[in-house]
């Protein structure tokens, strides 16, 4: 089976466990032998952990056990010992109150498990939105040689002869249903036509964005992120990844040697060209925090402004991930971005990211546009707004917004909780017009708690019935990466942390000027200060377990919403050991 000589090394990290003599060596090896390994597998060859977020409760990741098997083939083939282990899985469709409450918990668990076990390198298997940043954050803190494989997107949805996209068309169909333009039967039929195969959402939502971004970062093999989950080439790529992680251990290619400040800047450029999810901002800030790389919210705007939108995928465009892969995927996009990238940044392959993509072909110019003829010009990516209601920033995805609303002035209609708005959103007597600015607060990390995807609040039925499909919405929450609309998100500081969003009143005039990167409430500084003096933030009343810990320690959206005590690298040396 193995034609290579295993790269044996007595100084390897795993040999601190498996290379021992006497009682400790006995304990470390003996129990492992019950899995039927050949006698010589603990001889100092690289031990590769395969951290899997497989779960049947996370449908987007339910095929990852097969991917793990393909990785194992590659690890064995290269002379390593693969050991698969589970980490917490986070499935968007089912988990309550929101998976983002648990991203840091996954990161913390992954960090502790990687450090606590006799591993020399790690392959991370992820897919659904938060599983990718969660595992990457954990691995970044430990800093072993680490390589990611995302599980790949589902095949395109197909409904009555048309392609339909996960998330994006759910929002459209359910709004059509609310407006009485789509029957219950049609809605149920669409439901059966959307998720046709294993894999994550096949729009350019958060999962596809994070997959592409980890490729741009150099954390996964070039060309891998867009391969559909059920395409045999994904398994082949997983096998290659298994081979490669063994070599990375041999080369001592720790995660921090691959991913640097330049890598993060490349990821921001690629995210802008993709029309990627606003959630990528939160996750990249959190990952950078773990790696000790200084990255600020403003850099997303400064870098993103120079990048045209090249990828014609929902929600900003028309196509889906299958089309994107067939068109050339991330390598074709990166080649087109050329000098906007730091070409010398590394990939887990050991080559530079530019060496990986400089000859990448594009097979469909309607899906992946050229730099000269983009889908939208530079400046259409996510803008970072500031003003008296968002002193630490807020974001607006311009490519998913309505152009006529980018400069807007209108009266606020304010709700303290998303649930309060939902309860009246179908009320035909709601005092709302197309000019109204819908404000929902207490949706941030501390306020909800967990920072849910409620920022693209549904349009009031009264407006939907009048044919209005977008309006300016402001919240301290997030929006699904598959969502769209003129939604100002991640307002920081959040209202539960004492942010001024908490003192806006219904009837106040809100001003948005996306071109000037401004959003503010049109009241005097004195009036704002007076309101702030008596403002009592609403902090979620949690006293128990993870939720209480999270509320106490979570950082603001502008800092990536990690826990304050998890910033920075912790290293791979356990503090102590009992045997
Ligand atoms: Fe899992 Fe969209 S619900 S990726």
Image: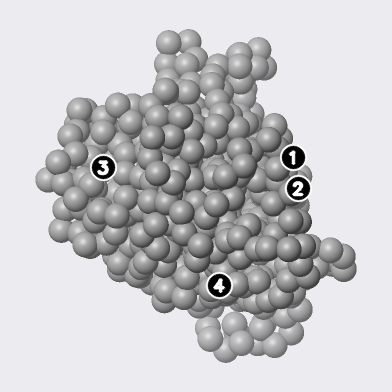
Side of 343 relative to 137 (left or right): left
Side of 487 relative to 369 (left or right): right
* Mark nearer the viewer, 2 or 4: 2
Real-space Cα distance between discs 2 and 4?
Answer: 27 Å
Ligand 1 within 8 angstroms of badge 2 C-beta? no
Label 2 packing within 10 angstroms: few (<14), some (14-19), many (20+): few
Real-space Cα distance between discs 3 and 2?
Answer: 44 Å
**SS type, badge 1:** helix
> Where is mark 3, residue-wise?
331
Q: Position of residue 424 (x, y in %)?
A: 73, 45
Ligand 1 within 8 angstroms of badge 3 C-beta? no
Side of 423 relative to 557 (left or right): right
Asked whether the beta carbons under mark 1 and mark 3 sit within 8 Å of each other, the answer is no
Ligand 1 within 8 angstroms of badge 4 C-beta? no
Label 3 packing within 10 angstroms: few (<14), some (14-19), many (20+): many
Q: Which mark is residue 571?
A: 4
| Nearest to the observer: residue 321 or residue 319 | 321
Q: Residue furthest right?
A: 543
Counting residues from the start of the chain, the first of labels 1 and 3 encountered is: 1
**SS type, badge 4:** loop
Q: Position of residue 350 (x, y in %)?
A: 29, 55
* Mark nearer the viewer, 1 or 3: 1
Q: Position of residue 489 (x, y in %)?
A: 53, 59
Counting residues from the start of the chain, the first of labels 3 and 2 encountered is: 2
Q: Which mark is residue 34?
A: 1
Counting residues from the start of the chain, the first of labels 1 and 4 encountered is: 1
Quarter residue 564 falls in = bottom right
């Amino acid at each position: 089976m193995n034609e290579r000589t295993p790269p044996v090394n007595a100084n390897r990290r795993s040999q601190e466990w498996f290379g021992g003599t006497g009682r400790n060596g006995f304990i470390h090896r003996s129990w492992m032998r019950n899995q039927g390994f050949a006698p010589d597998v603990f001889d100092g060859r690289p031990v590769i952990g395969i951290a899997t977020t497989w779960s049947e409760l996370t449908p987007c990741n339910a095929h990852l056990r097969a991917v793990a098997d393909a990785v194992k083939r590659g690890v064995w083939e290269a002379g390593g010992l693969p050991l698969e282990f589970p980490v917490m899985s986070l499935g968007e469709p089912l988990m309550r109150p929101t998976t983002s409450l648990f991203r840091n918990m996954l990161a913390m668990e992954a960090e502790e498990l990687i450090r606590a076990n006799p591993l020399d390198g790690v392959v991370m298997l992820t897919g659904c939105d938060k599983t990718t940043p969660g595992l990457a954050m954990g691995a970044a803190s430990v800093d072993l040689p680490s390589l990611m494989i995302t599980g790949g997107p589902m095949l395109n949805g197909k409904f009555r002869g048309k392609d339909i996209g996960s998330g994006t068309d759910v929002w459209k169909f359910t709004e059509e249903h609310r407006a009485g333009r789509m029957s219950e039967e049609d809605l149920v039929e669409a439901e059966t036509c959307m998720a046709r195969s294993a894999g994550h959402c096949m729009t350019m939502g958060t999962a596809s964005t994070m997959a592409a971004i980890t490729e741009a970062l150099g954390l996964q093999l070039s060309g891998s992120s867009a391969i559909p989950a059920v395409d045999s080439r994904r398994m082949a790529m997983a096998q290659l990844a298994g081979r490669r992680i063994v070599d990375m251990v041999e080369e001592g290619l720790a995660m921090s040697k691959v991913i640097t400040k330049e890598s993060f800047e490349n990821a921001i450029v690629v995210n802008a060209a993709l029309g990627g999810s606003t959630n990528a901002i939160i996750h990249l800030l959190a990952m950078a925090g773990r790696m000790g790389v200084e990255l600020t919210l403003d850099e997303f705007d400064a870098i993103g402004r120079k990048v045209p939108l090249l990828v014609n995928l929902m929600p900003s465009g028309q196509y889906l991930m299958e089309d994107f892969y067939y068109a050339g995927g991330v390598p074709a996009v990166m080649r087109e971005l050329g000098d906007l990238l730091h070409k010398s940044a590394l990939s887990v392959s050991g080559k530079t990211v530019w060496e990986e993509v400089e000859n990448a072909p594009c097979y469909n110019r309607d899906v992946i546009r050229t730099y000269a003829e983009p889908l939208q010009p530079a400046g259409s990516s996510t803008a970072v707004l500031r003003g008296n209601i968002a002193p630490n920033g807020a974001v607006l995805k311009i490519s998913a917004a309505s152009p006529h609303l980018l400069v807007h002035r209108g009266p606020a209609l304010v709700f303290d909780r998303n649930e309060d708005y939902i309860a009246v959103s179908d009320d035909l007597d709601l005092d709302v017009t197309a000019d109204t600015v819908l404000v929902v607060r207490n949706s941030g990390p501390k306020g909800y708690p967990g920072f849910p995807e409620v920022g693209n609040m549904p349009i009031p039925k009264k407006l939907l019935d009048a044919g209005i499909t977008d309006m300016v919405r402001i919240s301290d929450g997030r929006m699904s990466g598959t969502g769209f609309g003129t939604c100002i998100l991640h307002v920081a500081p959040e209202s539960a942390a004492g942010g001024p969003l908490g003192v806006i009143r219904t009837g106040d005039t809100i001003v948005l000027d996306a071109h000037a990167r401004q959003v503010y409430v049109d009241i005097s500084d004195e009036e704002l200060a007076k309101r702030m003096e008596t403002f009592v933030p609403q902090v979620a009343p949690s006293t128990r377990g993870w939720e209480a810990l999270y509320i106490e320690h979570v950082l603001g959206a502008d800092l990536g919403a990690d826990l304050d005590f998890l910033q920075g690298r912790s290293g791979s040396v356990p503090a102590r050991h009992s045997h």
